[in-house]
Image (cartoon, rainbow, N blue to C red):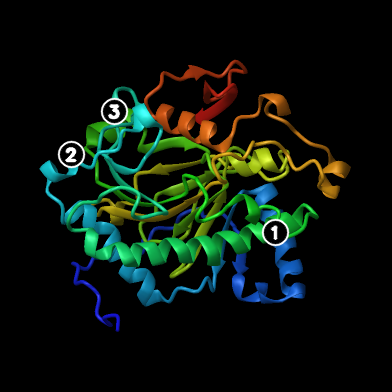
Amino acid sequence: MPSLTVPQVPHYASAPVTKENLQYADLAVIDLAKAHDVEGRAQLALEVAEASKTQGFFYVVNHGYTAAQTERMFDIADVPFSCVEADDKIAYTASIKETGSFEGYKPRQYWHVDNGVHDQVENYSIHRDVTKREHPKALRPLLPEIDAFAQHTHFNVLHPILRLLALGLELPEEEFVKLHGFSAKGAAYVRFMKYYPRSVDDELKTNNVWLKGHTDMGTITVLYSQPVSALQILGKDGKWRWIKHIENALVINTGDTLEFLSGGYYKATIHRVVQPPADQQNHTRLGLFYFGMTDDAVKLVPFSSSPLLQRVGITRRFEDKDAPTMEEWGKARTSAYGTTVLKAAEDGSKFEEEVIAGVVVKHFN
């Protein structure tokens, strides 16, 4: 009979919610409890499609995890940072540049931000198959819970959202789900991410930007909401707005892969991370993510069979014959991110550009 107890880990105490009056983005709130019948899914599909084509960000509530379960996962998320010695971390450092994979540690100061300043962000990424590689000793007793978390987010969050997105394109609701297997070869992963406060000099040199504006490379990114305000999205009006913390909610954003598959109908939204408000600046910021991607072999071409796309048209970033596979796109973007020399955009805007797998990728400076 399995044990009813779980390994003890230190509690991660986050900062209180900021009291500052921030300009928050007005995002849709999607209630997944309504997705259990045909009528509910049809209504939610309209809401998700509208949010994904206009803002690329929305909240999800009633996702199947209790507040206590979410709190437990944040405690686990801090273990690779607070319970593993620096020397031990080296053995589990990801070979990001060489393999195009984030699996393992991404150490602090790996990514260049601006004006010679590098990041103060430490990551630990775990493939959705938690047995794929070895992990630090402190994490090993926690792997069953991390596996359960990955499976929950994949099947009870990612798949339901993919069904709604397919319905939004007037496709059979399993069309996107079929591309996102859990057991198939693919790079979807859990990420624990810890931001540390920076020096005054670094803040001045980067204008308080911790990660410059970018889009995510996958289909859907699932972020479990946490109290430290730092995430912002770029609106169509060119203004940055903060993402507000909602207790035990998820923040969902659409990535490049979904934009490719939807022929530009769903947008990959530019977002960034900045210094938190003054009342949170002495605290670390712990992130709990699930990055959804298609299976490796999927060729990232639009679903031209979509009746909706046939009516509104398809915007291609590359010709279908030149489209990369998910594996090619993911590895190319991973190995390049934060380490390549970016060029100023030719249109004179504040964007910087790089070409990855034949595709122009923009970053907001």
Q: Residue at x 65, y 29 (%)?
A: 323
Q: Kindly indicate whether the residue at mark 1 contacts the one at mark 2 (C-beta within 8 angstroms).
A: no
For label 3, the residue is 117
- Which residue of the protein is positioned furthest toward the right in this rendering? 311
How many neighbours does mark 2 have within 10 angstroms: few (below 14), some (14-19), or many (20 or more)? few
Mark carried by residue 317: none
Tell me the kind of residue under disc 1. Answer: Glu
> Residue 165: in sight, yes or no?
yes
Question: Which amino acid is tagged 3?
Answer: Val
Q: Which amino acid type is shown beneath numbered disc 2? A: Ile
* Vertical order, 83 against 248 (above or below): above
- Residue for point 51% across, 41% down: 216
Give percent across and percent down for residue 204.
30, 32
In the image, taking residue 6 as reference, residue 273 lies left or right, namely right
Image location (x, y in percent) of residue 199: 21, 37
Q: Residue at x 36, y 76 (%)?
A: 68
Q: Earlier in the sequence, mark 3 or mark 1?
A: 3
Residue found 29% across the figure and 28% down from its top: 117
Residue 238's image quarter?
Answer: top right
Q: In the displayed structure, would residue 322 be above or below residue 169?
A: above
Residue marked by disc 2: 90
Residue 29, image x, y percentages:
60, 65
Residue 231: x and y in percent read 44, 49
| Residue hosting label 1 | 174
**Rendered-image quadrant of the N terminus:** bottom left
- Label 3 and label 1: CA atoms lie apart by 44 Å
Helix, strand or loop at label 3? It is strand
- Choose mark 2 or mark 1, whichever is in front: 1
